Image (cartoon, rainbow, N blue to C red):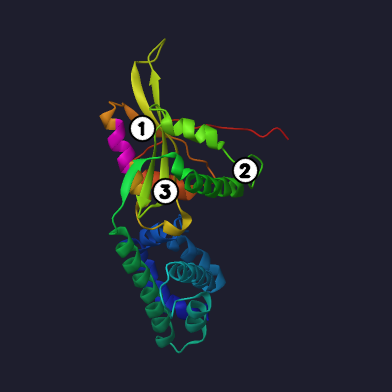
Amino acid sequence: MGLLDFFTAGLFFLLYMPLGGLQDELDEILGRRTQRYWAAYLLGIPTAFIYPLVWMARIAEELKAKAIDLGIEGPYTSWWHMFGWNTFGLPLMGPAVATWRFFETLNGIEKKLNEMKDTLYTIRKAEPRDLEAVNGLLQQVLTVHNRARPDLFNEIGKKYTDEELISIFNNPETPVFVYDREETVLGYVFCVLRHQGNGSLRPLTSLYIDDLCVHEKARGQHIGKVLFEYAKSFAKEQGCHNITLHVWEGNPGARAFYESLGLKPQYISMEMLCK
């Protein structure tokens, strides 16, 4: 069963994931940091290589869901298609069919995302008319944080009241920029200009990114990178010394995203639960 995948598609993916950039591509499309395939492959050794087969089947199911969300017509790759053809298909032909369907779906998603990326968009300052969209994105961020730290974050709630958001929008020290495509807000970046210059600290200004979010159905289109680059340009215009932000330990996808943009750890915030 799993040995069939080991001799065919498994070895192909083991090489192509890092060398062909497929792993990074999947991270971008799925909007999270996927488990490294080489790690899944090593875990497959004591399981007759069933583990990496199940890993690929799960990724296939996520790609299917992404394709459906984007309105791409099937047939798609899927959990059963990847697992079934690799497990019960004829030697060589089964994994070949499964791999072909996998890349057909992946290429269809990439084509659709590139078409959407080429659609005209603007980065502009948030306005009161954006309240509904921004509140919806804030809830998506809260959901991510709640999953990682339910002891700290509620499942549902509002970080800001509408009045507080409007005040933030209007304050030149706390600009909020939104990614607007055809009158639809697909992402935002909350910025804060921080000034220091007393006591032991040198006088300088930093741009603190309080929050950056892309709508869950628009991820994989490089919107997050576009928003960050816009914030970086704004920081340079303001004469900022650096850009800082915080990443929760339970959000490895966000950390990988920021590291890919060139950010490095400045300090580590530590905690101990008093139980």
Marks 2 and 1: which is nearer the front?
A: 2
Q: Tell me which segment is drawn in magenta.
A: 229-235
Residues under labels 2 and 1: Cα distance? 28 Å
Quarter of the figure that contains the C terminus: top right
Mark 1 residue type: Ile
Q: CA distance from mark 3 to mark 2?
A: 19 Å
One can see residue 202 in this view: yes
Q: Position of residue 140 (x, y in %)?
A: 53, 50
- Per the rendering, the mark at residue 187 is 3
Discs 3, 1 touching: Cβ within 8 Å: no
Residue 210 x %, y %: 46, 35
Give the class, few, some or many, for how many residues have Cα within 10 Å of label 3's Cα (few <14, many ≥20).
many
Q: Marks 3 and 2: CB-CB under 8 Å?
A: no
Q: Which image quarter: residue 259?
A: top left
Residue at horizontal 27%, vertical 59%?
118
Q: Main secondary structure of the magenta part?
A: helix
Which residue, given by chain and number where applicable, does mark 2 sit on?
A: 157
* Distance of label 3 from label 1 (alpha carbons): 19 Å
Q: Secondary structure at mark 3?
A: strand
N-terminal label among 3 and 1: 3
**Residue 189: image location, x then y, percent:** 41, 41
Based on the picture, tell me whether residue 234 belongs to the magenta stretch. Answer: yes
Q: What residue type is disc 3 on?
A: Gly
Residue 243's disc is 1
Which residue is at a point 48% across and 48% down the rendered structure image?
133
Which residue is at 48% across, 87% downward? 89
Residue flagged by tag 2: what amino acid is it?
Gly
Residue 113's x, y, as percent?
Answer: 34, 63
Q: Residue at x 42, y 31 (%)?
A: 170
